[in-house]
Amino acid sequence: MLKTSRTRVRPLAVAALATATIALSACAPTDEADSGTDSGASESAGTSETPAADECTPDTMETVADGTLTIATDDPAYSPWFVDNDPTNGEGYESAVAYAVAEQLGYTADQVAWVTVPFNKVVQPGPKEFDFDVNQVSITEARRKAVDFSSGYYDVVQTVITNKGSSIDGITSLAELADAKLGAQVGTTSYNAIVDQIQPSQDPAVFDTNDQAVQALKNGQIDGIVVDLPTAYYMTAVQLDDGLIVGQLPLAGDEPEQFGAVLAKDSPLTGCISSAVDALRTDGILDQIGQEWLEQQGAPELS
Amino acid sequence: MTDQVATTEAPEDWEPSEVQRERNEWRRRRTLRSAVIAAGSTLLLLGIIGGLVVSSPGWERVQATYFDWDKAVSSFPAVLEGLWLNIRVMALCAVLIVALSLTIAVMRTIRGPVAFPLRLVGTAYVDIFRGLPLLLVIFLLGFGGPALSLQGLPTSALFWGCSALVLSYSAYVAEVFRAGIESVHPSQRLAGRSLGLTYGQTLRHVVLPQAWRRVIPPLMNDLVSLQKDSGLIAVLGVVDAIRAAQIQTAIDFNYTPYVVAGFLFCCLTIPMARLTDRYARKKGYHGAGGHL
């Protein structure tokens, strides 16, 4: 009795396993048709061969949504890069640049859609739900292995800020920062600047957001924060009661550090976005937007 | 034992009977057979899953981003250094948590109307800190505590982060201890009292030793959990294993350091979980974990 029933179960089990396998492989993801051609960025540089202008129109560009330019940024979107945490209003440096890029490519403001994508999701492998992302991401060669960058739309200067009367208030050289407890946002080139350029004796404090770094500075848990210059102005003017800019760090390499738009690795749009940014730079539009949204006076350079 | 052959002593002459030998042989074969089947089915399942993963279209990208050996090697020292902080935080907090939670548990189990305020405080504490998400407690204490600017209180992120861990975890562990204390049969307590021991002595010599032994498996469970949650204090600015991995990842957007961190955490926690299970089984306590 038992025997017969068991022999009947076996093929059933095998069949079930086979079915499960087939079902699993059936719902396995398939690669998006990669449109065959490997257009877009070349291996090394983000600014690949400049595409002809007629390749970069809303009709010909392979955007995520047809006829629409889908732009991503994180939430919250910070001042002075965005205003009121609303990228769609065209206010703030990065929002204005994004709309200028769209206009350069022939999109109207109505044909621009914004999506919220956390930074980590932007730089992970896999298909992207946006055409490009603007989120104060610095261009580095190492990062090019994972994503494409457009040409840089902003030259970054790293600065140190602090509260009046702190131990680093009024210093003039990098050497005087050696014993300071400095903070920065995680995963930023500001953090790298602390480790590589300042090389303080105390490990830097690392925060999820710049807001938390400001809170720690207010609490006296850190002596100073390293951020890019526009953010430094915003922090000292708005977020801190008696904040001040200590000074800017000297250039780390020969090239100035730049923010660039992030695109999926080997995106077909990299060339178009880059040529649009380059055009904005040569036409002086980037400078105009900078004058409108960013503080222009510099900060003293730390020797 | 010396190997003596063919002595006249009866016990040495004993051999298992034919039937017993057959039985042993049959049992051995069955054991072997189930081991082979178990290994086969495990390999088949792993093979199917592995095959599906490796044959998926995005596998190459995933492999380059999450399983890059060079990146793993280069990020290992930083992640390991971060893990050292996790281990120190865990060790320190574990001691403090046991002390605080035992106090709370004793407060909650004291009898008599006079001790009502103690029970009230204990219950309120457990309710509040079990109700608050750990991350929230860390944020509130870690950024709010130093903002008080109280003289004599340190502003260090480590101090406040550990305080938050201790407060939060003690609420859970206090409940574990209370369960242990209440699981000791009332007759034990009464026996202690009838021998002339005071309430305190009964607690100290009769109830707590038994309660303690009973709750070791669930305590170990909480310790494993604490090991992983110790990293949450990274939000206050200190660098633990996961934060170190995040920093390494930001250099070139390669996520291998996270896998390295995960691997290191497993190296810590899995042996502890196995040890707990073994201990629990030895004690005949089968509620603490699955059998492998």
Image (cartoon, rainbow, N blue to C red):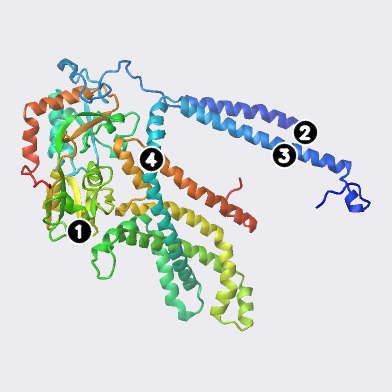
Q: Nearer the viewer, mark 4 or mark 2?
A: 4
Which quadrant, please, contains the N terminus of chain A? top right
Q: Amino acid at mark 4?
A: Pro
Whether callout 2 and callout 1 share a subunit is answered yes
Q: Is residue A146 visible?
A: yes
User: Badge 3 is on which residue?
Assistant: B31
Which residue is found at the position 16% from the left and 33% from the top?
Answer: A255
Identify which amino acid the numbered label 3 is placed on: Thr
**Front-most of B36 and B291?**
B36
Separation of marks 3 and 1 at Cα, in angstroms: 67 Å
Q: Is residue B133 visible?
A: no
Of residue A155 and residue B178, the one placed in the foreground of this image is: A155
Give the image location of residue A277, x and y in percent: 14, 27
Q: Chain of mark 2?
A: A
Camera-nearest label, 2 or 1:
1
Q: Are marks 4 and 2 in contact (CB under 8 Å)?
A: no
Q: Provide the chain ID for the residue under circle 4.
A: B
Q: Which residue is mark 4?
A: B257
Labels 1 and 4 touching (C-beta < 8 A): no
Secondary structure under badge 2? Answer: loop
Residue that label 1 marks: A218
- The residue identified by callout 2 is A1
- For disc 1, the chain is A
- Do callouts 2 and 3 point to residues on the same chain? no
